[in-house]
Image: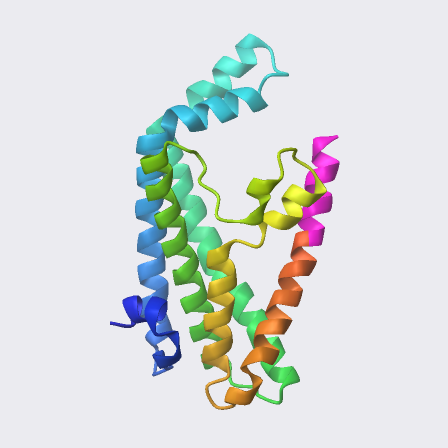
Amino acid sequence: MDFLRVFYAPKEIRYTGKKWVAFFVVALGVVFVTLMLNVHFNYEGIMKAVTERLSSMSDEQKAQVLKMLSSKRMIIQGVISLIITLPLKLLFMAGIIYFIRILMGKENFAIPLFAASVYTYIQAAGDFLKFLLSVIFKTFPFLTDPSILVSKKGFFSGFLSVFDIFTIYAMYVAALIVSEEEKDRKMYYFIILIGLLVLWGVIKGFMIKVGAK
């Protein structure tokens, strides 16, 4: 099955028809299950983090906000957010890959859409695995990026946080897929995607630096 093969034999993944739909639907399901389990197992941790952020509010305001954050309501809000954001994330990534392919002289949107769906699926699987590890090691959230090396929140923690191992691997697989017809260019695609990730890291780093002040 390609859903497993993508992790141990990514070079064998081939675009055929509308296979992107299957990857996206599975990714949607994995994210939904991860959301449900996160709220169930880490509800106290989530509420603790929210409470810390509400420290500047009065007790009455804090109580009103916390009352709205029941586990059931959090799941409903999460599902609504998921339905809206995941398709947008898919299209955004597909658009980026499509633009890169245009620069390479290719204009077919189907392959970028498939690559973006596989990218989304790998990230979803990574989030699910991180959730399992957070339960096993009782660490919430469980990080798989270099930001764990930085103790203080700021530019470097924000910058390093974008280099999650699953994100980088997902970009590598996406590069393999879009370069199927031109294997000699797979590194070009990968380097461009990593370059864009570095740019996003710089932006995120500044955002966190400003927010931490």
Q: How many marks?
A: 0
Q: Is residue 2 left or right of residue 80?
A: left
Tell me where residue 57 appears, x and y as whole percent.
61, 15
Residue 67 sits in quarter: top left
Residue 32's place in the image compared with 199, above or below, is above
Residue 88 shows up from this direction = no
Please say whether residue 208 is one of the residues in the magenta stretch.
yes
Residue occupying image coordinates x 35% and y 66%: 7
> Outermost residue toward the front?
149
Q: Residue 77 location, x and y as percent?
A: 42, 38
Identity of the residue drawn at 55% across and 41% down: 148
Residue displayed at 62% across by 49% down = 160
Assign the magenta stretch its main secondary structure. Answer: helix
Residues 59 and 38: in front is: 38
In the depicted structure, whether residue 11 falls above or below residue 127 = below
Q: Is residue 174 above or below residue 86?
A: below
